[in-house]
Image (cartoon, rainbow, N blue to C red):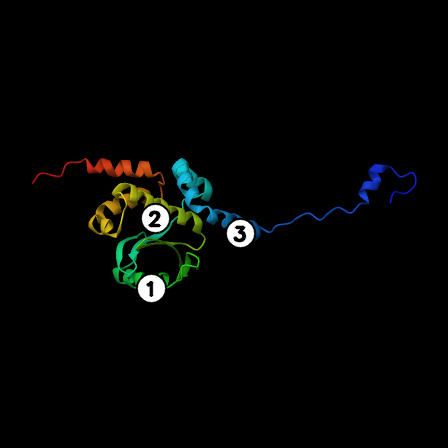
Amino acid sequence: ARAPGEPAACARTHAREPPSRVTSFRGRRGERRAGRQACRAPLLSSTLAEGGGGWWRARTHRRTMLRFVLLVNKQGQTRLAQYYDDLPAAERRILESEIVRRCLARADSKCAFVEHRSYKVVYRRYASLFFLVGIDGDENELAVLEFIHCLVEALDKYFGNVCELDIMFNLDKAHMILDEMVMGGSLVETNKLAVLEAVRKLDTVPPPKE
């Protein structure tokens, strides 16, 4: 209550102000992640098509480093393997078998991130193929999921309703599309039109004469 003769402005300072809503950094991050996953499919198509490589650099403030990219079918057979670390062939086979068994055994209800050795593996399933990408522990997992979807869209646009057989019988073309997007483990291009334009130009080159 206001004392006799006290100005109204001073009286308002005695009123109890409602507590301000405080949200932790982890809570805000969880809300953004939940909202992104809820509308992931339409968001990926529009964002990647409009933003391209500049959008990726603006989001991460640095180029994301990939350690390996694997395409594996449901039986655990590797259809495409690209490594950006200097690993011996024997070590690669052991690493692939460990990661593939672990990822394929996970239920669909679990998250798409797995920590294995010094890597964090981000994977996503499309029909009969699993796309597995190895990154460092401090990289952005959601950005890697968007990269996987962009790669699948580029493959689908090039082959037309891409399937496992297209990858098996056109492995060189699949590697060319991946190499246009990733160079030395660093993501350099996410614009599907630019990627496919470069690959189709190579298709027009006549074969060497015998």
Residue occupying the point 26% across, 43% down: 160
Q: Nearer the viewer, mark 3 or mark 2?
A: 3
Q: What residue is shown with label 1?
A: 101
> Rounded to the nearest whole Å, what is the CA distance between mark 2 and mark 1?
24 Å
Where the C terminus falls, by quadrant?
A: top left
> Rounded to the nearest whole Å, what is the CA distance between mark 1 and mark 3?
29 Å
Do the numbered discs 2 and 1 sit on residues whose CB atoms are within 8 Å? no
Q: Earlier in the sequence, mark 1 or mark 3?
A: 3
Give whichever of 159, 62 is nearer the camera: 159
Using a 10 Å C-alpha cutoff, classify the residue at mark 2 as few (fewer than 14 neighbours), some (14 to 19) or many (20 or more): many
Local secondary structure at mark 3: helix
- Image position, residue 6 (x, y; %): 89, 39
In the picture, the disc for residue 30 is 3
Q: Is residue 59 visible?
A: yes
What's under tag 1, amino acid-wise?
Arg
In the displayed structure image, the side of residue 135 where residue 169 appears, left or right: left
In the displayed structure image, the side of residue 83 where residue 6 appears, left or right: right
What's under tag 3, amino acid-wise?
Gly
Where the N terminus falls, by quadrant?
A: top right
In the picture, the disc for residue 7 is none
Q: Nearer the viewer, mark 2 or mark 1?
A: 1
Q: What residue is shown with label 2?
A: 185
